């Protein structure tokens, strides 16, 4: 038997690939046991296939690889090489993905800007609410001031500046029926830190008798400088002194800022 011719026939490649019939497989098995070169060729083909599977490149037994390929094409037809499909839809898909990412980024930016605008609007709304509340309080205070000044039942007592503060002045609005007393202190200077103005209802005869009817607290924050003090049923004069914060039991006459008779 011409073993070289048998090997070149390509039957051993088909044997290794399992493409022979049962009878042909038995024949190859028998010849491989009889002829060492046939057995060695089978081993060589198997190694080539392993190498081909591992690296997808026929680095070993190129001739065997080509023979196997030829036999397969002869038996099953020419192998059609598959090439990657370059469909325009692929590019459209990538373009759509990019546009989608850009759209998400734009929407996120818009959402962030919207959130910032909401924060700003809420802050402005809060500030506006505070302003409206402040104006409401101010308007109420002004209305009260006007009501006091315009009330014909009020007796208006002008208090003139005294030695410690000749330029000072004040007015007392006293309703003798209701005994309500308001003090207009807009003519008084701002009291020093730790000091407060104290208002006195004075009985002049037979002995000077002062009665405290209130402190002019929060002098700085009272824009109208109109203060409601305690009611009094009797007074011959009113005076205002500068006292330590919290007030005094009796007036400090050296700090008498204003005085006026009823």
Image (spheres, rainbow, N blue to C red):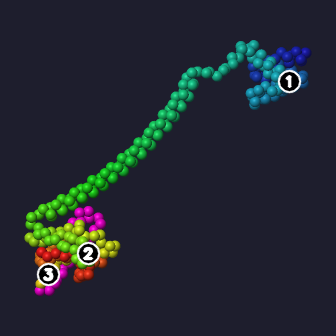
**From the viewer's perspective, is residue 208 above or below residue 46?**
below
**From the viewer's perspective, is residue 131 above or below residue 93?**
below
Front: mark 3 or 2: 2
Give me the residue at 54% from left, 28% from top: 95
Give me the residue at 11% from left, 86% from top: 206
**From the viewer's perspective, is residue 80 above or below residue 47?**
above
Q: Is residue 149 left or right of residue 215?
A: left
**From the viewer's perspective, is residue 107 above or below residue 130?**
above
The residue labelled by disc 1 is 41
- Observer-nearest residue: 207 or 49? 207
Q: Residues within 10 Å of mark 2 (few under 14, many from 20)?
A: some
The residue labelled by disc 2 is 165
Which callout, 1 or 2, points at the residue further toward the start of the chain? 1
Secondary structure of the residue carrying numbered label 3:
strand
Q: Is residue 254 left or right of residue 148?
A: right
Residue 156 sits in quarter: bottom left
Q: Residues within 10 Å of mark 3 (few under 14, many from 20)?
A: some
Secondary structure of the residue carrying numbered label 2:
strand
Q: CA distance from mark 3 to mark 2?
A: 23 Å
Which callout, 3 or 1, points at the residue further toward the start of the chain? 1
Q: Are marks 3 and 2 in contact (CB under 8 Å)?
A: no
Front: mark 3 or 1: 3
Q: Which residues are magenta?
A: 206-227
Identify the residue at the far bottom of this view. 206
The residue labelled by disc 3 is 203
């Amino acid at each position: 038997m011409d073993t070289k011719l048998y090997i070149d026939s390509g039957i051993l490649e088909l044997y290794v690939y399992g493409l022979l019939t049962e009878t042909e497989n038995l024949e190859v098995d028998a010849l491989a046991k009889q002829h060492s070169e046939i057995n060695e060729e089978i081993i060589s083909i198997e190694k080539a296939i392993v190498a081909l599977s591992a690296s997808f490149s026929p680095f070993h037994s190129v001739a065997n690889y080509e023979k196997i390929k030829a036999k397969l094409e002869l038996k099953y037809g020419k192998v059609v090489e598959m090439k990657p499909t370059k469909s325009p839809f692929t590019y459209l898909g990538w373009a759509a993905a990019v546009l989608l990412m850009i759209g998400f980024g734009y929407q996120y930016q818009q959402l962030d800007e919207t959130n910032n605008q909401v924060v700003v609007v809420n802050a402005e709304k809060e500030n506006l609410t505070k302003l409206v509340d402040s104006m409401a309080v101010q308007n109420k205070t002004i209305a009260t001031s006007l009501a006091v000044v315009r009330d014909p039942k009020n007796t208006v007592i002008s208090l003139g500046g005294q030695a410690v503060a000749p330029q000072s002045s004040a007015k007392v609005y006293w309703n003798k029926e209701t005994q309500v007393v308001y003090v207009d202190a807009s003519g008084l200077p701002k009291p020093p830190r730790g000091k407060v103005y104290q208002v006195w209802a004075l009985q002049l005869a037979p002995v000077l008798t002062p009665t405290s009817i209130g402190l002019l607290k929060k002098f700085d924050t009272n824009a109208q400088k109109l203060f409601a003090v305690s009611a009094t049923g009797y007074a011959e004069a009113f005076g205002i002194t500068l006292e330590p914060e919290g007030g005094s039991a009796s007036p400090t006459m050296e700090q008498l800022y204003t005085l006026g008779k009823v």
